[in-house]
């Protein structure tokens, strides 16, 4: 697979959604979908790292697959609201690198 920028991923999702008359869901429906996908990711995390084991009848899914589902819905949500996720990322990184720059204990150089 080739590497894609966030903008390319947003364009790819938009091209996919644009082929359907229904288009993007409303913001409230999109938030509900995102919550649903986050719950599915939480369930997989709990199966892999928590005490709750999978039932024999449950389909085998991966954390990667669930993160992909969540990312797809996030991209749909952003596209529907005309939000550039690359720009949103830059904004949040600026915040972390200024406001929160001394919030956490830094590793010593050359040591892990």
Image (cartoon, rainbow, N blue to C red):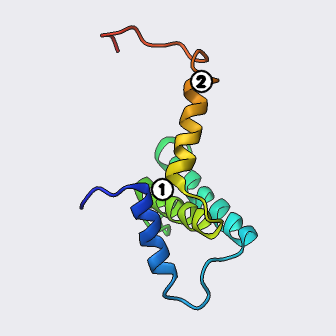
Q: Secondary structure at mark 2?
A: helix
Residue most extreme to the right: 28
Residue 98 bears which disc, if any? 2
Q: Nearer the viewer, residue 17 or 43?
A: 17
Q: Is residue 89 above or below residue 100?
A: below
From the viewer's perspective, tell me whether residue 92 is left or right of residue 28.
Answer: left
The quadrant in which residue 93 appears is top right
Above-or-below relation of 103 to 50: above
Q: Position of residue 62 (x, y in %)?
A: 41, 57
Q: Is residue 104 left or right of residue 107?
A: right
Q: CA distance from mark 2 to mark 1?
A: 28 Å
Q: Quadrant of residue 79?
A: bottom right
Most extreme residue toward the top is 108
Q: Secondary structure at mark 1?
A: helix
Q: Residue 21, percent across and down?
A: 58, 91
Identify the residue at image location x=35%, y=15%. Answer: 112
Task: Tell me which residue sits at (55%, 57%) in the image.
Answer: 84
Say which residue appears at 58% left-offset and 29% top-offset. Answer: 96
Q: Earlier in the sequence, mark 2 or mark 1?
A: 1
What percent of the width, then of the height, locates residue 55? 52, 61
Residue plotted at (63% across, 70% down): 80
Percent from the top left, x then y, of residue 78? Answer: 60, 62
Mark 2 or 1: the one toward you: 2
Q: Which residue is mark 1?
A: 67
Q: Nearer the viewer, residue 10 or 59?
A: 10
Q: Looking at the image, which is closer to me, 84 or 67?
A: 84
């Amino acid at each position: 697979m080739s590497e894609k920028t966030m903008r390319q991923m947003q364009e790819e999702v938009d091209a996919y959604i644009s082929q359907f008359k229904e288009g993007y869901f409303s913001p409230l429906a999109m938030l509900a979908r995102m919550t649903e996908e986050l719950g599915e990711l939480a369930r997989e995390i709990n199966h892999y790292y928590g005490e709750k084991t999978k039932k024999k009848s449950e389909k085998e899914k991966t954390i990667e697959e669930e993160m992909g589902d969540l990312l797809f819905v996030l991209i749909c949500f952003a596209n529907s609201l005309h939000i550039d996720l690359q720009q949103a990322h830059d904004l949040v990184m600026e915040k972390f690198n200024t406001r929160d720059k001394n919030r956490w204990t830094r590793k010593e150089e050359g040591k892990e």
